[in-house]
Image (cartoon, rainbow, N blue to C red):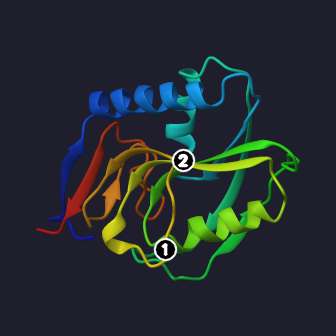
Amino acid sequence: MTAKAKFHVLYTREEISAAVEKIAAEIEKDYLGKNPILIGVLKGSFVFLADLVRHLGLPLEIDFIGLSSYGSGTESSGKIRLERRLRTQVKGRDVLVVEDIVDTGLTTSFLLEYLQRKKPASLKLCALTDKPSRRVTPVNIDYLGFTVPDKFLVGYGLDMNQKFRNLPHICYIEEG
């Protein structure tokens, strides 16, 4: 990224908050009477997951899994690495994967197949953002905040080389 790169707000913190509340209401309705385990995909989902669970008034558990396909660039390498394993048993459980972004679908489909082999009672996907224009592998998103354009996004957990996760808005970067 050059010194002339500009950040443009795509979604404000208020728009994000409204989307998180809407998603939480849908999840609460669908998981009423259940005790789901929410699996946050590290590192990007942690901000979204934290806000999401504060809006959920149902019993739940949280675990995290670490996957990587980016390395230090802005393009997916296509090779998925499992960097942090689950600590919780998911067999027979209602599992909800929480993602910051679904892009090519490679990482997400890898994760869903990995979890399906562990025989959960149910398996659904919640994503804050979806970039279908870059999809290589089909992915079904059960709960979605925003469909986004084919731009590199940062903020609200999304990063570029581990930077900018702390921005309160979702922004895209434009080289000047």
Q: Nearer the viewer, residue 35 or 153?
A: 35
Q: In this view, does 45 lie to the left or right of 133?
A: right
Q: Give the x, y percent position of residue 70.
A: 51, 73
Which circle, 1 or 2, is nearer the viewer? Answer: 2
Element type at marker 1? loop
Q: Which of 15 and 166 is in front in this view?
A: 15
> What residue is shown at x 43% (from left), y 56% (from top)?
159
Locate residue 134, reporting x and y percent: 35, 73
Which residue: 43% across, 25% down?
Answer: 21
Q: Quadrant of residue 61?
A: top right
Q: How many marks?
A: 2
Which three-letter amino acid code belongs to the residue tagged 2? Ser
Tell me the kind of residue under disc 1: Ser
Between the C-alphas of marks 1 and 2, the distance is: 18 Å
Residue 72 is marked as 1
Residue placed at 25% from the left, 35% from the top? 12
Residue lying farthest to the left in this orientation:
176
Establish if 42 lies above or below 4.
Answer: above
Answer with the quarter of the image where residue 1 lies: bottom left
Q: Badge 2, how many Cα within 10 Å: few under 14, some, many 20+?
A: many
Image disc number at residue 45 = 2
Residue 82: percent from the left, percent from the top? 72, 69
N-terminal of the two: label 1 or label 2?
2
